[in-house]
């Protein structure tokens, strides 16, 4: 058996959700988000509506996201128990057309921008934070913040170009 393909597959595989189990799963009524900053108040409706749906990440947190333009989202994390709002390491995540990202099995596919589960502290982000450094990022939720544990650079799709970018072909 040739080990090189298996090693390459493992090198490009993102961490598994099961490897980062969440603690207790909150089943109560979600607390109202505490909107302390101007950015929070500016998107109050989206944050309040998203948080009201209840936890969807790391046991008792809710990842709330809203669109910020074409192929762009702005996400936050809200503690369903306390209402405390936590930022991600970026305010804006662009994604889409000329890039492909690594899926959880190690294959290159076009996938959703955020992957997470209620029973896991793992958050997988595919995109371009603040419109640069496109990659698949893996983060572990640790009490009050995300810690980056992995990064796999995105691959450009051959022949693709960014909308609005001049075509350099003859």
Image (cartoon, rainbow, N blue to C red):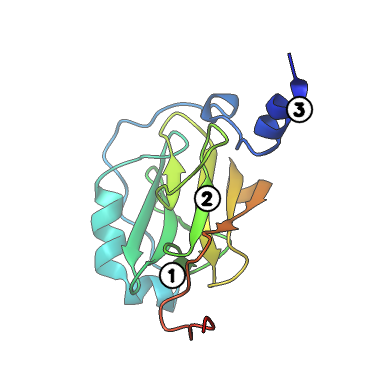
Q: Which residue is mark 1?
A: 36
Q: Is residue 127 visible?
A: yes
Disc 2/disc 3 C-alpha distance (Å): 21 Å
Element assignment for label 1: loop
- Mark 3 Cα within 10 Å, few/some/many (few <14, many 20+)? few
Q: Nearer the viewer, mark 2 or mark 3?
A: 3
**Depth check: 5 or 81 in front?**
5
Quickly name the residue at label 2: 101
Of 100 and 14, the residue lying toward us: 100
Q: Nearer the viewer, residue 155 or 22?
A: 155
Image position of 60 (left or right of 148): left
Secondary structure beneath disc 2?
strand
Q: Which residue is labeled 3 in the image?
A: 4
Please give the name of the residue rendered at 52% of the width and 81% of the height, measured from the top-left corner.
169
Q: Nearer the viewer, mark 1 or mark 2?
A: 2
Question: For this view, does 97 lie left or right of residue 158?
Answer: left
Q: Earlier in the sequence, mark 1 or mark 2?
A: 1
**What residue appears at the point 42 percent right and 75 percent down from the top-left corner?**
39
Measured as percent of width and height from the top left, residue 34 is found at 39, 61
| Residue 136 versus residue 163 in the image, above or below | above
């Amino acid at each position: 058996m040739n080990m090189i393909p298996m090693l390459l597959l493992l090198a490009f595989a993102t961490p598994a959700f099961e490897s980062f189990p969440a603690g207790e799963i909150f089943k109560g009524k979600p607390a109202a988000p505490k909107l302390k900053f101007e950015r929070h108040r500016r998107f109050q409706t989206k944050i309040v509506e998203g948080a009201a749906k209840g936890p969807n990440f790391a046991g008792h947190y809710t990842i709330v996201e809203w669109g910020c333009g074409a192929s762009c989202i702005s996400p936050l994390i809200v503690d369903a128990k306390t209402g405390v709002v936590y930022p991600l390491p970026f305010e804006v995540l662009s994604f889409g057309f000329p890039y492909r990202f690594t899926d959880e099995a190690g294959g290159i596919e076009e996938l959703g921008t955020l992957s997470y589960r209620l029973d896991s502290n793992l958050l997988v982000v595919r995109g371009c934070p603040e419109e640069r450094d496109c990659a698949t990022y893996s983060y572990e939720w640790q009490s009050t913040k995300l810690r980056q544990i992995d990064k796999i650079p995105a691959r450009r799709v051959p022949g693709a170009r960014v909308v609005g970018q001049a075509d350099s072909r003859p």
